[in-house]
Image (cartoon, rainbow, N blue to C red):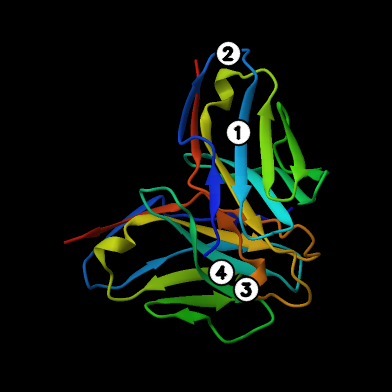
Amino acid sequence: AQTVTQSQPEMSVQEAETVTLSCTYDTSESNYYLFWYKQPPSRQMILVIRQEAYKQQNATENRFSVNFQKAAKSFSLKISDSQLGDTAMYFCAFMKPPRSGNKLVFGAGTILRVKS
Amino acid sequence: DVKVTQSSRYLVKRTGEKVFLECVQDMDHENMFWYRQDPGLGLRLIYFSYDVKMKEKGDIPEGYSVSREKKERFSLILESASTNQTSMYLCASSFSGTGFLSSTDTQYFGPGTRLTVL
């Protein structure tokens, strides 16, 4: 069974600085997908960024980027120029083929606090 | 924008009561999901449905059942609520998609229902 591990329960960062959230996963699959979801204090979970395992290029979405290391089974999220609105719980998630149902396996989450 | 709504933000029930949690999505998504979220455990899949009247068990289905009579609505049922079912419940939906990963694979989440069983 696939597992996703987020080893940092809580992190904090000063506004405008850069922070990296860690995620490792365990799978025997060669083709799969990885996601970072954000859950602000208002509780609506939203997608931050996603990565296809067959792509070597790291995904980037504005201030958010990932460092995908397939051999190491590592998928970290880097947030540049942190903003107060980035304060949230961040979940790393894994999805494997077959794609029916698009089932996700989530990590335990990392609480990120951005300080002014 | 995709909208996923849940019937209640907060719910308090007593042990042994039958509890219904409702989820509605407005984007004609085939897939719908129920998760529970607990501190230190992340989100765990309870049940999901890939079509009307179709359902599959997730990782923690014990004590729960689901119903999907219409494409837009997915209900989670606690037949006899217990205190260990006190949790945050999140609903999500997505398209089935075909081929490689596309924007249709994104799961869209509702705001969650905080259920307390006394």
Q: For marks 1 and 2, give the CA distance.
A: 16 Å
Amino acid at the residue labelled 3: Ser
Please tell me which residue is depicted at 60% across the width and 18% down the height of the picture.
Answer: B82
Q: Earlier in the sequence, mark 3 or mark 1?
A: 1
Q: Chain of mark 3?
A: B
Q: Which residue is denoted by mark 4 in the rendering?
A: A74
Q: Chain of mark 1?
A: B
Please tell me which residue is depicted at 27% across the width and 75% down the height of the picture.
Answer: A81
Q: Chain of mark 4?
A: A
Q: Which residue is denoted by mark 3 in the rendering?
A: B103
Q: Which residue is denoted by mark 2 in the rendering?
A: B15
Amino acid at the residue labelled 2: Thr
**Circles 4 and 3: CB distance less than 8 Å?**
no
Marks 1, 2: nearer the viewer: 1
Q: Which residue is denoted by mark 1 in the rendering?
A: B21
Query: Residue B62, how many percent across, how many down?
Result: 73, 29
Q: Earlier in the sequence, mark 1 or mark 2?
A: 2
Q: For marks 3 and 2, give the CA distance.
A: 41 Å
Dot 4: within a 10 Å radius of its alpha carbon, few (fewer than 14), some, or many (20 or more) residues? some
Please tell me which residue is depicted at 56% across the width and 72% down the height of the picture.
Answer: A50
